[in-house]
Amino acid sequence: MNFVTLLREQPDIVRNYHSIGCNLLSCKGTVEQIVVSKGAEATALNRFYKALQTAHGAIVGPWYRPPIDPHHWQTAKNLQVFSGTFDNRFANWIDVEALTSTGITVIDTSRGMTPSVAEFALAMTLNLIRHIPESLNATQNGDWRGDVTWNHPDFVYGDLTGRQVGLAGFGSINRRYAELLEPFQCTVQSYDPFVADHVLDNHNIQRSESLVELAEKSEIFVVGLPPVPTTLEIINREVISALPKGALFVLVTRMAVVEQEPLWERIRANELAAAIDVFDPEPPPKDAWFRRHPNVLVTPHIAGGTDFCHRRCFTHACQDTLSVIKGKKPTFQATQWDQLCYAGQLKSEQ
C-alpha cells in the first residue's frame, strides 16, 4: 500500500503530524510526506499530484484544500480514500458523490473539532453569566469584592443551573453543548428544521417552531449554525429583537449567520450581553468599540484553535484512511447529505 500526506509548512506541527501519520500508516505500507513551503507551493503540489497516481490513500493536513481537478482523480488509479479536515466545504472544489461513485471514499474530520468548540462555548457561557473576566481583571488591578459589581440585575446573571437555553441549530457543536449542559438541569430548546423529532427527543430537547419563538424563550441563546447560502444573516433583526432584555448571546460558529447591526444596537443599549469568538471582518478593527465594551466578551476566533484539536482531527483522518483500506466503516465519511447541507440544498424534516 502507498500513502501520501500533504501538510502546509509549520515546523513543529509538520514534525508532529508526520510522526502521527507515519506511526499509524507505515504498518500498512509506505508513506510519502510532502510539505507545502511558502514560495514553493507549485513544486509541492506537483509532487502531490504525481503521488496520487499510485497512492491508495491520501491524507491532507487540517484546513488545507489543495487545488484539484477531475484530471487528478482520473489518473489516481489506485486511490481508495481521500482524507483530511476540510471544514465541510466541497462546493467548487470536489464532488463527494462523484468520487464515491468511482470508489473513492472522502473523509472529512471537521466534526472532530466539535469537543473543543462546544467546550469553549460552555466556558464562555459560564464566563458571561458570572462576569469572571471582569472579576479577574479587577482583582489583578488591586480591587476586591467591595470594589466590584457582583450583581447585574438587568442581565441573566449568577447560576447556569436551571436556565432556559435556546440552541439555534442542532448540529454537532450544539449537540455536544447540550450534552455538556446536562448536569446544569437547564431547560433546552432548539430550532433546526433539518433534524428529526426523534433526534431531539433522544437528547431531551424541546423543539421550537421558529428562530423567533426560540429567541423569545431563551435566557441564553447559543448560535451553532454553519454559514451556508440559506443561513446567511438568518439570525436577523426579528430574531435578535425577540431576545428578552438581559439575555446572553453566545456565538462560536461564524458571524456570517448573524445580522450584525441589530445585535450591536441591542448590546450598546445595554439590552444584551454577548460572548463572541468570530467576526466579520477578521480581525475586527483595533479600535472597534465592542473590543472593550463591558457587555461583550471578545475572543480571537480560538474556539477550535488548539494544537490538540488539530492533532486529533489529523489522527482521525489517518485512522479513517486505514478503516477504508481495511474494508471497515469510517467514522467521518463525507456524504451527499454533507454536500447538500453546505450547498444550502437540504430538505426540511418538518
Image (cartoon, rainbow, N blue to C red):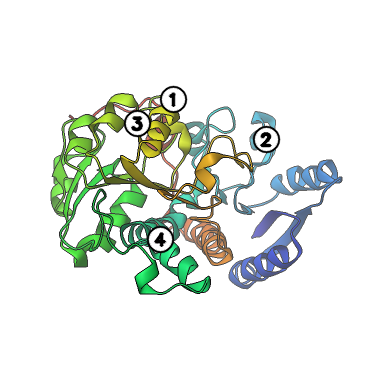
The C terminus: image quadrant: top left
Q: Residues within 10 Å of mark 1 (few under 14, many from 20)?
A: some
Quadrant in the picture for residue 334: top left
Instruction: First in sequence, mark 4 or 2: give its number.
Output: 2
Residue 90, percent from left and from top: 53, 34
Three-letter amino acid code at disc 3? Ile
Q: Is residue 242 visible?
A: yes
Q: Which residue is disc 3 drawn over?
A: 235
Q: Mark 2 and mark 4 in contact (Cβ < 8 Å)? A: no
Q: CA distance from mark 1 to mark 4?
A: 26 Å
Instruction: First in sequence, mark 3 or 1: give its number.
Output: 1
Instruction: First in sequence, mark 3 or 2: give its number.
Output: 2
Three-letter amino acid code at disc 4? Pro
Instruction: First in sequence, mark 3 or 4: give its number.
Output: 4
Residue at image point 13% right, 49% down: 201
Three-letter amino acid code at disc 1? Pro
Q: CA distance from mark 2 to mark 1?
A: 23 Å
Q: Is residue 228 visible?
A: no
Residue at image point 22% right, 30% down: 212
Residue 98, percent from left and from top: 50, 31
Q: CA distance from mark 3 to mark 4?
A: 24 Å
Q: Which residue is disc 4 drawn over?
A: 115
Pick whichever, 115 or 234, lies toward us: 234
Q: Which residue is disc 2 drawn over?
A: 68
The secondary element bearing badge 3 is classed as loop
Image-based side of 29 in relation to 36, left or right: left
Q: Which residue is disc 1 drawn over?
A: 229
